[in-house]
Image (spheres, rainbow, N blue to C red):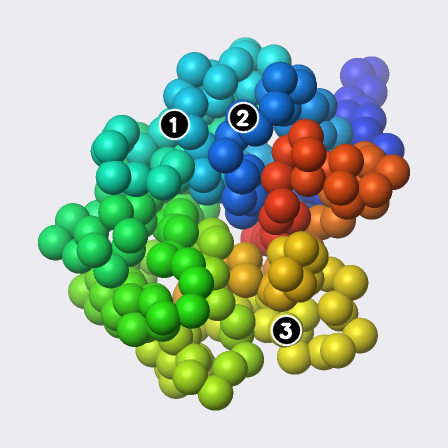
Amino acid sequence: NIIISEPELPENAYGSPETLDILTWNIEHFPKHNNTIDTLSSIISDLYVDIVALQEIEDTQSLYEVAEQLGDNWVAYRADINEQVYGELSYLINTDEVSILQSPYTILHQYEYDFAWRLPYVLKISYNNTEYTLINIHYKCCDGSEDRRLQSSIYLDQYISNNLSNDRVVLLGDFNDLLIDSYNVFDPFLNESDEYYFADYYIAEDPSMIPYWSYPSWPSHIDHILITNEIFNTEYDAITVRVDEIFFNSFNNYDNLVSDHRPVGIRISD
């Protein structure tokens, strides 16, 4: 008889062998410290996830070093370098559980200005013989740029409707805006509740969830995960992963070594 045992999960695991585990994570000015690469590699390894969609990746070689430290099963992709870009969109992918169907590519090139020259970065993968399309984004920041963020939502809605209408789409990243607001840049998605759902919406609407806001230094919740209706009938849950509390003795230490954003994750079961 052969006994097949499940892998032993790290103590601080977010993911599991039974779920597709995805994070979005703005790693501010990566790498912002001499120890950022080692620290980030250790955290991701302990979180036990399959895909990390990253924003603000400044250095390609440093990203490759993270993948190398994570192990031979990990690969890294970074969007094309553009001198006008403030940090690039990137992916880290654990190929033990995930098959990459197509190398990541950028879309909506004609709208570079609205996306602040950080074009949406698309990744097509298969998990347990089910295909998913991830779109990693980083909207324009700050007050006064609401119209650009709204236009970005409009263009993404149109792109998904025209090109990915039957795909299981996960749109995730640093959206740089609140889900609940009088002038809501997410109306193109929120007004189509039969098509889209922000899996982290409950964090924004429930005051008791303030400790789970993704950007404590403001404080605000501006990193989100949007899913399309092809995922509605699956089991899933989303949460901000408070890595500053799990792995550090203060948010300042986490901020100094890694980022001013926390990661937001989603776990999907087929």
Q: In which quarter of the image is residue 80?
A: top left
Q: How many residues crowd around disc 2 within 10 Å: few (fewer than 14), some, or many (20 or more)?
A: many
Nearest the eye: 80 or 253: 253
Q: Residue at x 77, y 26 (%)?
A: 7
Q: In the image, which is nearer the foreground, mark 1 or mark 2?
A: 2
Percent coordinates x, y for residue 47 in the rendering: 71, 35
Residue pictured at 38% horizontal, 57% vertical: 139
In depth, the one of 65 and 131 nearer the eye is 65
Which residue is pictured at 54% across the width and 62% down the height?
A: 222
Q: In which quarter of the image is the N terminus?
A: top right
Q: In this view, does 88 lie to the left or right of 152?
A: right
Q: In percent of the image, x 24 and y 33: which residue is there? A: 82
Q: In the current view of this chain or complex, which residue is farthest to the bottom?
A: 182
Q: Relative to 191, is 144 above or below? A: above
- The spot of residue 173 in percent (x, y) is 47, 52
Q: How far apart are the alpha carbons under marks 1 and 2?
A: 16 Å
* Residue type for callout 2: Pro
Task: Name the residue nearer the viewer: 101 or 188.
Answer: 188
Residue type at numbered disc 3? Ala
Residue 73 visible at all: no
Q: Report if residue 139 is visible in the image.
A: yes
Give the foreground label among 1 and 3.
Answer: 3
In the image, residue 116 sits, relative to residue 83, either above or below, namely below
Residue named by callout 3: 204
For residue 31, the mark is 2
Q: How far apart are marks 1 and 3 (CA)?
A: 30 Å
Does label 1 or label 2 sit earlier along the sequence? 2
